[in-house]
Image (tube, rainbow, N blue to C red):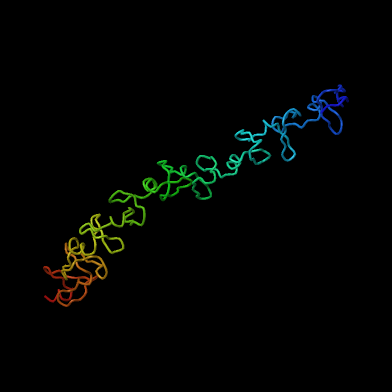
Amino acid sequence: MADSSNCFYCREDLGGKRFVRNEGRPVCVRCHTKFCANNCAECHRPISVETKELSHKGRYWHEECFRCAKCYKPLAKEPFSTKDDRIMCGKCCSREDAQRCHGCYKPILPGIESVEYKGNSWHDECFTCFNCKRPIGSQSFLSKGSDIYCSPCYDKKFAKHCVSCKKPITSGGVNYQDQPWHSHCFVCSSCSKPLAGSSFTNHQDQAFCVDCYKNCVAKKCSGCQNPITGFGKGVNVVNYEGSSWHEYCFNCKRCSLSLSNKRFIAKGKDILCTECGNKE
């Protein structure tokens, strides 16, 4: 603008010189920058009339200062957003609002594959086994405290191991004499029949099914000659001078009186009650 008046501040003659009117008063460019110009929200220096000024919500910037607060990309001709009074490009604003990966702590951007577990989120490649460090992916996993394990590492580190095959017991199993077994490993020592859920007995630290114990291990009753298994009706046993009887078979040879918990007389291989024994 050209006028023959003087600058309102320095009173310099403005004839033929460039000036600005501020509230209707002529002001030279130098004084306008010093007394009237808006200050840049970024560099805090005055914005001269000789430079381009950008404004947004009552704040002002030099064109070259109007840039993303995170990546410093110029935004004078680009879409932008504001967050906590900071100017940001769309990409950085998305990063700022995105969830943070519990593994690398970087943002999980929209469209990126991620995993959510117990209120936390991970990039797919960051959701890894605490032990082997391999990504869990689509395979099953287990947690111990705040740590995540793939199934093989969890079994190797925490699962009980079978006394027989030494491999981890991942489900079910049998506990016998305070030792863990796979159900399919806990078998009869003679015929290898699985014993889980069925009756069995122990002989010299070996487990036997009922049939094998009867046929291969159990003593024979001196009365009925059948095996003394310790099961059912034959649970009580009488032993005398190297021979054994079912309690219900320990009877007087002549009168068949039960001699369990009674005095008796032995005549050769025969067991007699005192009355029958004294008759001879």
Residue 63 position (above or below residue 264): above
Q: Residue furthest top?
A: 12
Residue at the (16%, 72%) spot, across then down = 272
Name the spot of residue 230 as percent of width and height, x first: 25, 65
| Residue 180 location (% of width, % of height) | 33, 53
Q: Nearer the viewer, residue 7 or 18?
A: 18
Instruction: Give the quadrant of the C terminus.
Output: bottom left
How many discs appear? 0
Q: Residue 236: x, y in percent?
A: 25, 67
Q: Quadrant of residue 3?
A: top right
In this picture, residue 219 sits left or right of residue 83 = left
Q: Is residue 221 above or below residue 42?
A: below
Relative horizontal placement of residue 180, taking residue 46 as reference (left or right): left
Task: Give me the residue at 31% from left, 49% from top.
Answer: 167
User: What is the x, y in percent for residue 56?
Assistant: 72, 39
Identify the image quadrant of the N terminus: top right
Write the residue at 43% across / 47% down.
137
From the viewer's side, name the closer residue of 175 and 21. Answer: 21
Dividing the picture into quadrants, the one containing residue 243 is: bottom left
Q: Residue at x 36, y 55 (%)?
A: 171
